[in-house]
Image (cartoon, rainbow, N blue to C red):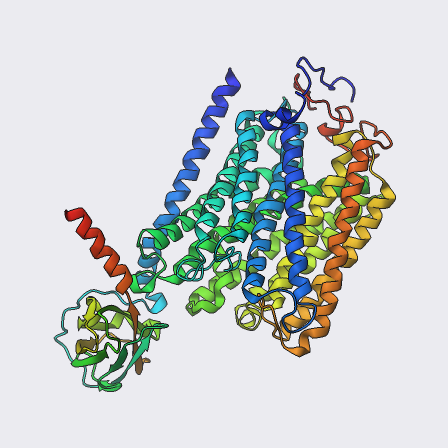
């Protein structure tokens, strides 16, 4: 525990703004990613609250339908590409070198680039709100011809913003793969890698496989809009359904990009607070890999109602249901890890437990949606909204929160305020369920998604959901306050931080020194 | 340094992979058509002139329904001369669609066919079709657009009715832009 604390031969960080602009240090870049994603989380969250405020009562009160559509679109894009993905990349930057015993990421200069592209991409995307014709209003899935023939002029800026995010993600993924494959400490074999590292390795391969396809599909849109091609225009021999096929070929692996690292975080936290080794390590690795492979052959379950032939409906239905098998293996392993463990319930563990329960609920509603004949009823209703928010908010976001609380003492050397953390957790847990659980019911009753007004019978559940959304949204300020006070001054943390912690990242000092593992540690 | 060489190899491979996937995104466009063609899914009809069949199967009759649809704001009047006909498989049938440009200005249209049930799509053979060409009409001009079809005798026995639907698209703005572009390049 003591010999591997690296002695720094280098100078510490530069001072002032240039430290952050020119940094190539994985910890600095990880911090930048995390703060950026939190800023985007609040931005996208404000849009969500505007949506929920409008839906508090039937009728139009606050905003016009076109602006409502811009809000749903921007909320989705910002949360997916601005909040969840950069948060995972930030955690990867901070933790992967510490977990594999590497001095830094493999390609530090490129690391700086992959972060600093993002603020420009999102500045460009958000600037469309102030343009003539408004921001993109066609939904985050930007189906053609809504996003081509009928798109506002700002769509071109949207396309370039997506290109930049894609380049950033691909560079980040390349960096992570190179770090994991080439910079492991001696003795750190592949099957000794912490699960967070394993899930990120697989996620990075998914990113490299599908982000270019997203770049391709927006390029086709660009050509249809400006250069007279007809990829998605039936009059010129194209096909709008082609757009959906290519988009979801990207889109389905994308949803696993947003959940596999979450699996990794939870697989780190549960063993720590259950004070037991993770149950079924190898099966976790194989389950993650099979989920990743299956994600490439299920895309058309998003399109059951476009007129697929029966053979297609059946194939995509059964392939989708097959994914429940490796996912079930994971949930089983988490529960088995806790079985007869000496559990304590610190904030990271609470978030991880809520993740397991609520993500499973989201997984079950996903199974319902996978049944093609049933999906004809659920398609484009609030049931779908309930489903994907259950897997993304108490799924991905709770895992990120859990990870943030879990590693925060290692990052800044102080413990956060545990009571405040628990208050934050319970506000989140209650808020999320009040927001999204009623959406199952209004969805089954037939309320369509992406509408600013609705029939009177949906009024009560919508009002309840809005109350929950405001609880969830404003409770993030507790988190912000807790993090800032943890950085400023708080009880100093020990190197181990948690009683049951395990792994290389806990062998360095708290806070983690600016340069760690300059001499590679020995892994037994 | 050994690490630099290793990184170089890893990065080269991954960048090539990303570029390949970018290409694959575009390759999906023809692949998608090829897939539909092989499997006969999607009711996609190939816009290729078919050879007339020599064998006529008089043992059964198939109903051929013809439908005309205007895409969104397309202002033409567009309808089939006859909306239904009974045909023996292999028999050649000559009919037409009527189009009238109800506006005062010159317009160009393109008709896109679709066949239902999609299983029947490969067996509906168009010997001559107005959908093979763009249809320019001056203001208030009317035109009878010829269509010669036959149903292949290999049509599965359980199909008794086939619907042939044409959707008429207004492609005037695109065509004008293309003509202007050609004008510039020929100068």
Front one among A94 and A472 = A472
Left/right of residue A57 with respect to residue A491 in the rendered view: left
Q: In the picture shown, does residue A1 fall above or below A274?
A: above
Of all residues shown, which one is farthest toward the top? A9
Q: In the picture shown, does residue B182 fall above or below B46?
A: above
- Residue at 73% from the left image edge and 48% from the top image edge: A334
- Which corner quadrant holds the C terminus of chain A? top right
Relative image position of residue A398 (x, y in whole percent):
71, 49
**Residue B178, image quadrant:** bottom left
Residue A328 in sight in this render: no
- Which corner quadrant holds the N terminus of chain A? top right
- Residue at 55% from the left image edge and 43% from the top image edge: A123
Left/right of residue A401 with respect to residue A121 in the rendered view: right
Front one among A203 and A59 = A59
Residue A230 in sight in this render: yes
Relative image position of residue B171 (x, y in whole percent):
28, 65
Q: In the picture shown, does residue A447 fall above or below A345?
A: below
Relative image position of residue A519 (x, y in whole percent):
66, 16
Front one among A517 and A515 = A515
Front one among A441 and B167 = B167
């Amino acid at each position: 525990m003591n010999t591997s604390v690296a002695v720094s031969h280098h100078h510490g960080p530069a001072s002032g703004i240039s430290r952050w602009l020119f940094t190539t240090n994985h910890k600095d870049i990880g911090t930048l990613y995390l703060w950026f994603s939190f800023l985007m989380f609040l931005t996208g969250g404000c849009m969500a609250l505007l949506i929920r405020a409008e839906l508090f009562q039937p009728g139009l009160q606050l905003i016009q339908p076109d602006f409502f559509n811009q809000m749903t679109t921007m909320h989705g894009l910002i949360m997916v590409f601005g909040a969840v993905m950069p948060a995972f990349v930030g955690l990867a930057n901070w933790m992967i070198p510490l977990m594999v015993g590497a001095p830094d990421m493999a390609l530090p200069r490129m690391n700086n680039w992959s972060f600093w592209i993002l603020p420009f991409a999102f500045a460009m995307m958000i600037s469309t709100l102030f343009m003539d014709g408004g921001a993109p209003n066609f939904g985050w899935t930007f189906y053609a011809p809504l996003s081509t023939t009928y798109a506002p002029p700002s769509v071109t800026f949207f396309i370039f913003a997506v290109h930049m995010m894609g380049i950033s993600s691909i560079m980040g993924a390349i960096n992570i793969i190179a770090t994991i494959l080439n910079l492991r400490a001696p003795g750190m074999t592949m099957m000794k890698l912490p699960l967070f590292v394993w899930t990120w390795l697989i996620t990075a391969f998914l990113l490299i496989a599908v982000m270019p396809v997203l770049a391709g599909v927006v390029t086709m849109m660009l050509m249809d809009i400006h250069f007279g091609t007809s990829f998605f225009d039936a009059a010129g021999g194209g096909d709008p359904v082609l757009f959906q096929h290519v988009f979801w070929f990207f889109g389905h692996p994308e949803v696993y990009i947003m959940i596999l690292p979450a699996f990794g975080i939870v697989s780190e936290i549960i063993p720590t607070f259950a004070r037991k080794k993770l149950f079924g390590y190898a099966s976790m690795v194989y389950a993650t890999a099979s989920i990743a492979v299956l994600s490439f052959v299920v895309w058309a379950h998003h399109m059951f109602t476009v007129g697929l032939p029966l053979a297609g409906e059946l194939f995509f239905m059964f392939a989708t249901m097959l994914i429940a098998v490796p996912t079930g293996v994971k949930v089983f392993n988490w529960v088995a890890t806790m079985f007869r463990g000496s559990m304590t319930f610190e904030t990271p563990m609470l978030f991880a437990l809520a993740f397991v329960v609520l993500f499973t609920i989201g997984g079950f509603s996903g199974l319902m949606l996978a049944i093609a004949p049933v999906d004809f009823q659920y398609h484009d209703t609030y049931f779908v909204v309930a489903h994907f928010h259950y897997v993304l908010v108490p799924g991905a976001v709770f895992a990120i929160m859990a990870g943030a609380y879990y590693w925060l003492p290692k990052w800044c050397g102080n413990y956060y305020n545990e009571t405040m953390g628990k208050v934050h957790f319970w506000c989140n847990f209650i808020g999320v369920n009040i927001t999204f659980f009623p959406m199952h019911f209004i969805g089954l009753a037939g309320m369509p998604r992406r509408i600013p007004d609705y029939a009177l019978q949906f009024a009560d559940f919508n009002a309840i959901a809005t109350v929950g959304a405001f609880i969830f949204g404003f409770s993030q300020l507790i988190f912000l306050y807790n993090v800032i006070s943890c950085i400023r001054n708080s009880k100093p943390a020990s190197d181990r931080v948690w009683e049951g912690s395990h792994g290389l990242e806990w062998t360095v000092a708290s806070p983690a020194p600016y340069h760690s593992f300059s001499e590679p540690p020995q892994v037994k | 340094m050994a690490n630099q060489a290793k990184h170089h190899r890893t990065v080269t491979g991954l960048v090539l992979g990303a570029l390949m996937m970018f290409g694959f995104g575009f390759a999906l466009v023809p692949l998608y058509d090829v897939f539909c063609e092989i499997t006969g899914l999607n009711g996609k009809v190939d816009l290729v002139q078919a050879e007339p069949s020599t064998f006529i199967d008089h043992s059964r009759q198939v109903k051929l329904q013809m439908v005309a649809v205007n895409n969104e704001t397309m202002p033409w009047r567009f309808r089939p001369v006859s909306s239904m006909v009974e045909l023996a498989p292999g028999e050649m049938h000559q009919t037409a669609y009527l189009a009238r440009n109800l506006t005062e200005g010159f317009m160009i249209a393109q008709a896109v066919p679709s066949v239902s049930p999609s299983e029947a799509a490969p067996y509906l053979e168009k010997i001559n079709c107005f959908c093979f060409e763009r249809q320019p009409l001056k203001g208030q001009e009317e035109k009878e657009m010829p269509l010669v079809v036959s149903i292949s005798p290999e049509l599965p026995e359980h199909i008794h009715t086939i619907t042939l639907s044409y959707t008429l698209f207004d492609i005037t703005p695109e065509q004008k832009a293309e003509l202007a572009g050609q004008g510039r390049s020929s100068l």
